[in-house]
Image (spheres, grey):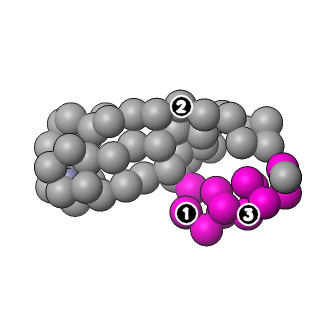
Amino acid sequence: MQCRRCAKPKMVEIRMTVSDVDLRFLRCVRCEAQHWLSPDGEVPLRAVLDLARVTR
Ligand SMILES: [Zn+2]
């Protein structure tokens, strides 16, 4: 996985499950760009927050 902003090929990856959706949170170690990925593709942060809200 490569950062889309600065192209650095090293990102910190954290996996978690929110509302039965497998999500991966990726953060670039250089420019701190952040991405959320679901099995279907990239997810906006806002959608992640919506999922989290439904759960609780
Ligand atoms: Zn970056």
Q: Residues within 10 Å of mark 2 (few under 14, many from 20)?
A: few
Residue marked by disc 2: 15
Quadrant of the rendered structure where residue 50 is? bottom right
Check disc 1 and give the amino acid type: Pro
Question: Which residue occupies the extreme bottom position in the image?
Answer: 46
Closer to the observer: label 1 or label 3? 3
Q: Is 51 included in the stretch rendered in magenta?
A: yes
- Distance of label 1 from label 2 (alpha carbons): 16 Å
What is the number of the mark on residue 29?
Answer: none
Q: Residue at x 46, y 34 (%)?
A: 14
Q: State whether residue 47 is above or below residue 22.
A: below
- 23 relative position to 31: left or right: right
Q: CA distance from mark 1 to mark 3?
A: 10 Å
- Give the number of the mark in front: 1 or 2: 2
Which quadrant is the N terminus positioned in?
Answer: top left
Q: Earlier in the sequence, mark 1 or mark 2?
A: 2
Provide residue 4's location: percent of width, then percent of height. Answer: 26, 54
Give the magenta range.
43-55
The image quarter in which residue 46 lies: bottom right
Question: What numbered label is drawn on residue 50?
Answer: 3
What residue sits right under mark 1 in the picture?
44
